[in-house]
Image (tube, grey):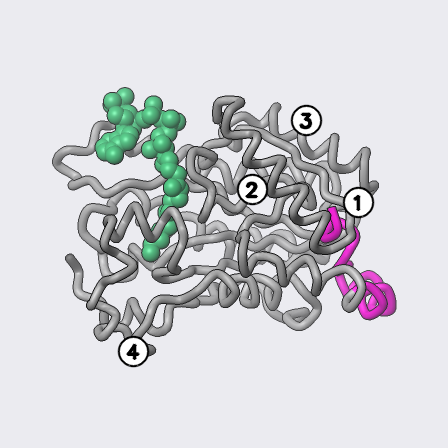
Amino acid sequence: GALSRGVPDPCQDPRAARAARGKLCIPTWALPAQHPVWLGYAVQELSLATPGLAGCSQALSSLSWFFQASKKLVAATGQQCLPVSMDVRQPQSIAAAVDEALQEFKRIDILINGAAGNFLCPASALSFNAFKTVIDIDTMGTFNTSKVLFEKYFRDHGGIIVNITATLSYRGQALQVHAGAAKAAIEAMTRHLAVEWGPNKIRVNSLAPGPISGTEGFRRLGGKFAEQSKQFSAIPLQRAGNKTEIAHSALFLASPLSSYVTGTTLVVDGGSWLTSPNS
Ligand code: HXC
């Protein structure tokens, strides 16, 4: 909720952006140190630490976690937070969530497209539906949500879109053809939308995290011993990343600090993809 009011596009209102920065953005963005989930301010949860929430078609039991996160955001920032739930594969459910957020806050400034589904699976064992499911959540979900928000608000008011991608496709990582293809498409989409929507004062960028400790992606892709992994020595910075580092990077892309940046991908992986073995 706080962010829906913070970080106005500086192209539209630089004074408002300056005024809002200290009051609204920083406290909220600082929170992901513990909870890398920003909800309510936009329309889609960041799923990196969101077990079971990837496709948003979660059972009600998962939602208690969702509301707890919302309460923590409010307590930590003193700002409003409206938790909205939707399935990014269902444009109508996105539209309903965006309408709810707009009704509450009258504006949306930033969209973080973070919903994702993933698992390790060799291409030979991957069913057609498994591949499609990940494309539907990651790629279609990013397009669906961006398009709904464009039509309902960003086209006339400008805005900022940050797409969470991954470096999986850069070296053709094994067991990840579904997620790698889905994320590569998102990076292409980032460039296309940046070109088409730039004149509407919309910036579109991607953020590609590497191995980030304490996240669902880390557990799923690295296995249960991922946190103790000795393989960090292969990473140029010799360690896993942490949630705060992703939060700071997202803050950069979503704030006026990157006001002339669009259509690019910020890789935040300690140099990992440059040296990681393809295994
Ligand atoms: C093979 C699998 C599978 C698995 C599901 N499927 N899990 N195939 N291995 N582990 C197949 C199913 O058999 C089915 O195909 C199809 O996928 C759809 O499965 P459903 O369960 O019906 O779909 P749904 O409930 O909509 O979602 C499934 C899911 C979801 C996408 C796998 O459970 C999920 O991903 N949850 C995790 C969310 C998450 O952790 N997200 C963060 C990812 S981290 P059939 O043919 O049988 O019908 C990330 C960052 C990477 O991506 C960072 C790198 C460092």
Q: Amino acid at mark 3?
A: Ala
Where is residue 159 drawn, in percent x and y?
70, 53
Under mark 1, the amino acid is: Arg
Looking at the rendered structure, which numbered label has been put on residue 45? 2
Tag 4: amino acid: Pro
Q: Position of residue 217 (x, y in %)?
A: 36, 49
Which numbered marker is on residue 236?
4
Magenta residues, start to end: 1-20
Does 224 appear above or below 83?
Answer: below
| 95 and 3: which is toward the camera | 3
Q: CA distance from mark 3 to mark 2?
A: 15 Å
Instruction: State the CA–CA distance, disc 2 to disc 4.
Output: 30 Å
Q: Quadrant of ligand 1?
A: top left
- The answer to whether mark 3 is within 8 Å of ligand 1 is no
Report whether 37 appears left or right of 15.
left
Label 4 neighbour load within 10 Å: few <14, some 14-19, many 20+: some
In the image, which disc is placed on residue 96?
Answer: 3
**The disc labelled 2 sits on which kind of residue?**
Glu
Q: Residue at x 56, y 42 (%)?
A: 45
Instruction: Tell whether position 19 is magenta.
Output: yes
- Please tell me how crowded label 1 is: few (under 14), some (14-19), or many (20+) other residues with Cα within 10 Å: many
Q: Secondary structure at mark 2?
A: loop
Q: Describe residue 43's horizontal placement relative to residue 10 as left or right.
A: left
SS at circle 4: loop
Question: Residue under circle 1?
Answer: 107
